[in-house]
């Protein structure tokens, strides 16, 4: 393979990547004010977070306190802080900090 072939391949791959990343924004721009997108915009963030939490804790053995306590208190801290401050970034960071701290304290 010569360098011209490599550069042409990189150019094509880059163009396809940019087009694929821009396509949803260009297509959805036409449907911005539809009732379906408004409902999805309301329901999707909590739904995605619920799926992520359930998936994350599905492998935890709740019969072992060293695994259960950090998870339960971390999720509880995240939920309580989010209910109080309504700041997702703060809630996730603080909940993760509580989880990691308890994991380190109870794991050793």
Image (spheres, helix red, strand yellow):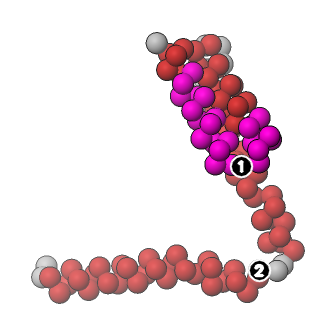
| 102, 18: nearer the viewer | 102
Q: Compared with residue 5, is residue 35 higher up or lower down, i.e. above or below?
A: above
Q: Which residues are magenta?
A: 80-102
| 28, 76: nearer the viewer | 76
Residue in the image at 64% along x and 35% along y:
95
Determine the residue located farthest toward the left in the rendered image.
Answer: 2
Mark 1 nearby-residue class (10 Å; few <14, some 14–19, many ≥20): few
Q: Closer to the N terminus: mark 1 or mark 2?
A: 2
Q: Compared with residue 73, is residue 80 higher up or lower down, i.e. above or below?
A: below
Residue 32 is labelled as 2
Q: Is residue 39 magenta?
A: no
Q: Position of residue 42 (x, y in %)?
A: 81, 61
Question: Please, what is the dominant secondary structure of the magenta stretch?
Answer: helix
Which residue was labeled with disc 1?
A: 87
Determine the residue located farthest toward the right in the rendered image.
Answer: 35
Q: Is residue 53 left or right of residue 108?
A: right
Q: Position of residue 77 (x, y in %)?
A: 70, 31
* Image quadrant assignment for residue 15: bottom left
| 9, 85: nearer the viewer | 85
* Mark 1 → mark 2, Cα distance in angstroms: 26 Å
Q: Is residue 90 magenta?
A: yes
Q: Position of residue 82 (x, y in %)?
A: 75, 42
């Amino acid at each position: 393979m010569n360098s011209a072939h490599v550069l042409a391949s990189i150019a094509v791959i880059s163009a396809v990547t940019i087009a694929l990343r821009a396509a949803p924004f260009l297509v959805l721009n036409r449907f911005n004010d539809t009732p379906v997108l408004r409902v999805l915009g309301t329901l999707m963030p909590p739904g995605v977070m619920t799926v992520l939490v359930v998936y994350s804790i599905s492998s935890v053995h709740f019969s072992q306190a060293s695994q259960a306590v950090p998870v339960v208190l971390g999720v509880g801290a995240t939920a309580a802080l989010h209910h109080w401050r309504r700041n997702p970034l703060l809630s996730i960071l603080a909940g993760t900090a509580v989880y990691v701290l308890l994991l380190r304290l109870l794991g050793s």
